[in-house]
Amino acid sequence: MKKKRQNKTKQIKRYKTKYEYVLPQDEQQLITDAIAHGHIDGIRDGINDKSSTDVETQARMKCEQLKMATKAEYVTNDFEYFTRVFASVYAKSYFEKQQRFKANNSLYKADLKAVHDAGGWQAAYQVYREHTGQLTEFLGRLMGVR
């Protein structure tokens, strides 16, 4: 009995934090990450005519992937809220990227080059995430939110 308890304690200690996103406090970070994921997937999928239903399904699948891949014990304290916010922002970001590509095909080629120059999809996601975070912080200060 004592050995089982020790194993469980060791298992819990391997996580740095209990939650990756504590909502609603971390909503801005969730929005930033959803924008970055939407943009990167919009590039990865190439120019397409996916329906809003398909993109929303893709966003919900991404939420499940994030849930499984989190480095925290749990991805969030409120998965329903997390999914609702993430899916909405992801879809808007994805469609915005697609509209830009359809209006100017050279933007798609430039974004593919930027992904390559960054070192691949994961590295490009980190760059988008950082830039989006800086922009949202700046806009928040500009508007007196933070």
Image (spheres, rainbow, N blue to C red):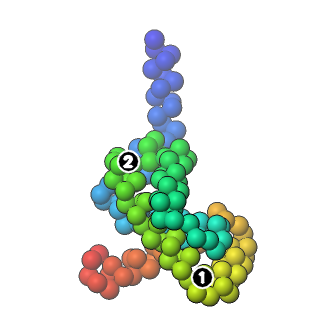
Provide residue 92's location: percent of width, then percent of height: 45, 71
- Which of the pair 91/48 is nearer the observer? 48
Residue 76, image x, y percentages: 39, 48
Residue 143, numbered circle: none
Seen at 60% across and 82% down, the residue is: 102
Which quarter of the figure has residue 86?
Answer: bottom left
Q: Residue at the location (71% across, 67% down)?
A: 120
Judged by depth in the image, the label closer to the viewer, 1 or 2, is 1
Label 2 element class: helix
Whether residue 55 appears in this view of the structure is yes
In what quadrant of the picture does the N terminus appear? top left
Q: Which residue is mark 2?
A: 79
Estimate the spatial distance between the alpha carbons at disc 1 and disc 2, rounded to whole Å.
Answer: 34 Å
How many other residues sit within 10 Å of disc 1, few (<14), some (14-19) or many (≥20)?
A: some
Q: Element at badge 1? A: helix
- Of 97 and 10, the residue lying toward us: 97
In the displayed structure, does residue 97 sit left or right of residue 135? Answer: right
Above or below for 136 versus 56: below
Q: Label 2: few (<14), some or many (≥20) within 10 Å?
A: some
- Tag 1: amino acid: Lys
Residue that mark 1 sits on = 102
Q: Residue at x 48, y 22 (%)?
A: 6
Examine the image and state in which quarter residue 89 appears.
Answer: bottom left
- Note whether 20 is above or below 90 in the view shown: above
Q: Relative to the observer, which residue lies in front, 52 or 31?
A: 52
